[in-house]
Amino acid sequence: MLIKKGFDFMNYSDIDMRKKHIMEFIINEYLESCTPVGSRTISKNSDLGVSAATIRNEMSDLEELGLLEKAHSSSGRIPSELAYRYYAHELLNEFNEKKSDEKTNSLTVRSERSGIKGENALSLACDILSESTNSVVISSLERFNQPRIKKLEIINITSKTYVIVFVLDNLEVSSKVFNVDFEISSSDLKKINFLLNKILSINTQDELTAEELDELVSSALNRDLIQYFLYFINKEYRGINDIKTKVTGLMNVLEMPEYNDFFQLKSFLNLLNSESEIKRILNKKLNNHIEVFVGEEIGLEELSKNSLVLTELILDNAYKIKIGVLSPLRSDYRKNISSLYNISWKLISL
C-alpha cells in the first residue's frame, strides 16, 4: 500500500513484520492510555519474544522512517501522523476484504415500518454514530428534486409565537418557528390555514398576482397578513432544497485530551460553526464506499491533527448524503470504520 499526499511514497509492505507489530502495538497502546509507550512495556506485554534492547533498536529505526515520534517528557514513543495513516488505511483494506460479501445488522437506524425518511433518518443515524464512536459526526444532505407542499398548517404556540408545519408530497414533515408583532385570533388563524391551503392547491405554489389574491381573500381577513404568510412560506419553501449540514456529538470533544488546550478547542469549534467549512471538509471525491483521511489528507490546516472517516450515499432515491466521523489522530479507527459502514448500510438497505 502506498501512502499519498504530502509524504514520500513508501511501500508499507517493505517494512518487516517485527517493526509493523511494534508500531501497531504502540498505536493500540497509545489509543488506550494516551501516554508514550516504552520498550519495556512492549517487551512485557507483547508476544514478540525479544529483549527490550532489541525493541529499542527497532523503535529507533521506526523513528528514522518517520513512523514514531519521541515524546519530550518521556523515553517512550508515540505514533506519528504517517503511522496513523498507514494504520488506518491498512485497517480499511482489511475491513473491505472482510465485508465485501457480508452484511451486518449491528446498528439499527430504522425499521421498514417506522416511516422515518430523509433528513430525519439521517439525523437519527448521526445520533447513533456519534454515540457509538464517541466522536463528532458531520453530515450533509442534498436533494435531487424539490418536493411540493402537500399541506401546511400554522399553529399558535404563545401569544405572538407560531410554528408553520409543511407536509411535503414525499411525506416528509418540515417545520419552522417564527414570531409576529401582533396577535391572531383562533378563528382568523383557522381561516388563514384554510385559505393558504386553498391558494397552494389552486396556484401550485407560484406567486399570486394582487388581483388573484383579492379574489381569494375575503373582507374578513387582512390582505397584507395573507401576503406576509405567503412571502414567509415561499422563503422557507425555497430553502428546503438547500444543501443542509449538521454537526452531531460536539460535546464529545470535551472528553478528548487533545482539546484540553483552550485555543485549540476554540479553533475547532469555530470551524464547525461554519456551514461553508463543513461543506469543504465533506467535499471529497470518494473512490470507495468508505474512505479514511488522516491529518493533512483532510485538506484543512485546522484539522491537520485529526482524522476523518467518510462515506457518500444515495438515500430513498431522493437525496445525496455524506457522513463523516471526525476524530483526533489518536482515535479508534477500527470502531469508526465499522460503525460508519454499519450505519450507512442500514440507511440504504431499508
Image (tube, rainbow, N blue to C red):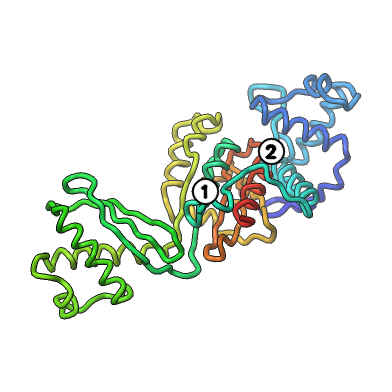
Determine the secondary structure under disc 1: strand
Q: What is the x, y in percent for residue 349?
A: 64, 56
Residue 32 position in % (x across, y down):
67, 27
Q: Residues within 10 Å of mark 1 (few under 14, many from 20)?
A: many
72 or 142: nearer the eye?
142
Query: Could you say which is closer to the camera, residue 158 or residue 279?
Result: 158
Which residue lies under the disc numbered 2?
Answer: 80
Identify residue type, mark 1. Ile
Residue that extends furthest to the left in the rendered view of this protein? 219
Residue at point 31%, 61% (across, down): 152
Q: Is residue 297 visible?
A: no
Question: What is the quadrant of residue 79 in the picture?
Answer: top right
Residue 173 lies, with reference to residue 61, above or below; the image says below
**Looking at the image, can residue 343 be seen?**
yes
Left or right? Give the position of 276 relative to 321. left
Q: Residue at image x 31%, y 54%?
A: 176
Q: Quadrant of the C terminus?
A: bottom right
Q: Is residue 126 left or right of residue 48?
A: left
From the image, state whether disc 1 or disc 2 is nearer to you.
1
110 lies above or below 284: above
Q: Earlier in the sequence, mark 1 or mark 2?
A: 2
Question: What's the CA distance linking mark 1 and mark 2?
Answer: 25 Å
Residue at x 72% of width, y 41% of height: 83
Residue most extreme to the right: 49
Q: Are marks 1 and 2 in contact (CB under 8 Å)?
A: no
Q: Is residue 17 left or right of residue 347?
A: right
The tag on residue 138 is: 1
Report helix, strand or loop for mark 2. loop
Up-down relation of residue 206 to residue 16 (above or below): below
> x, y (%) of residue 266?
43, 38
